[in-house]
Image (spheres, helix red, strand yellow):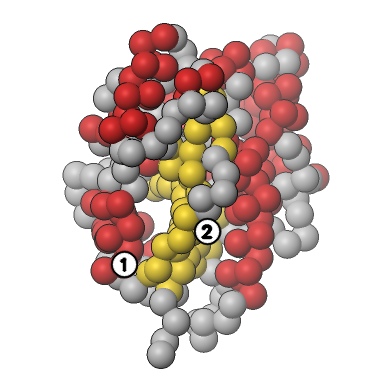
Amino acid sequence: MGGSGSGGAAHGKSRFDDVYVQPDPRAYFTRLAPLDYEIPHHAQPVFRRLAAERAAHGDGRPGGPVVLDLCCSYGINAALLNHEVTLAELYERYTSDTARRMTPTQLAAWDRKFYAERRRPDAIAVYGLDIAGPAVRYAQEAGLLEAGFTDDLERVPPGPALRDALDEVGLITLTGGGSYITERTFAALLDGIRRPVWVSAFVLRTVSYEPVVRTLAAHGLHTTVDGARTYPQRRFTDERERQHAIEAVRALGGDPSGREEEGRYHSVLYTSRPRPVP
């Protein structure tokens, strides 16, 4: 996940597996900076709004609903959701000379202080799920995730710890991981969730989200899509990746002109909520 998932939908898309198995996020930001990876920036206001709405939506259960960030990697979405910080500031921080001189342990301590000082008063608990163990562990060490899980739900059902955690989940978020996970992951999660759950997913236009939409519908969720705009994700790594994206968008009935043809992946925002009771 987060670039290192097991799904087959990422065929033709450049892989970044090596940056997700590092002990800290410096390689992640160094590799993605030249590609202008920006989807977490676009997701930041969306996730903040939905998290606040979901938290205000009483469901008769004790405690506030938790956010579960799929393909969470180093906790970037959690950092942007709960702290007064921008994605641009994170790029500057983790590619700086100061960060470069630190050991992973020193960097984690530096981050814990940094994020604690910038914690928003309306912060909501975030759990992370990603098969990239080093990334998940760092996000926990830095204080970004209240809990982290590495269950590969494309292959196996949730383990005991994740099953217990699902009782608290009220909002599922996703940025870009639709290339690596399928409806199998969503079915495994929704089978174990006990609260009313909302889903907010930014999905590349090269990937069909329809199997997930059908799975969500089978669990009582109605999905809407923001058709008015798309959200740039990152630049293509090379011409091969660009051509693959153009062909994939056309195969799904989309028009790549002005978007993928111009050199960037673009995502669409899907929002799913429980169907109103008649």
Which residue is at the far left? Answer: 155
Residue 103 or residue 67, whichever sits in front: 67
Q: Is residue 145 left or right of residue 188?
A: right
Q: Choose top left, top right, bottom left or bottom right for residue 159.
A: bottom left
In the image, residue 24 above or below residue 162: above
The amino acid type, in three-letter code, at marker 1 is Ala
Going 19% across and 44% down the picture, which residue do you hit?
155
Apparent side of residue 264 relative to residue 111 in the rendered image (left or right):
left
Left or right, 120 with respect to 13, comes to right
Residue receiving disc 2: 67
Can residue 169 be seen? no
Name which residue type carries label 2: Val
| Residue labelled with disc 1 | 217
Q: Quadrant of residue 49?
A: bottom right
> Going 51% across and 50% down the picture, which residue do you hit?
227
Q: Nearer the viewer, mark 1 or mark 2?
A: 1
The location of residue 18, given as percent across then percent down, is 40, 18
Q: Is residue 69 above or below residue 250?
A: below
Mark 1 and mark 2: Cα distance apart in space? 20 Å
Say how many tags the image has. Answer: 2
**Relative to 117, residue 110 above or below:** above
Quadrant of the image containing the C terminus: bottom left
User: What x and y, as percent, mark residue 230?
Assistant: 54, 40
Judged from the image, the secondary structure of the residue bearing numbered disc 2 is strand
Label 1 Cα neighbours within 10 Å, binned few <14 / some 14-19 / many ≥20: some
The residue positioned 38% from the left and 24% from the top of the image is 245
* Residue at x 32% of width, y 24% of height: 247
Q: Percent from the top left, x then y, of residue 170?
A: 49, 67
Numbered badge on residue 169: none
Q: Is residue 168 left or right of residue 6?
A: right
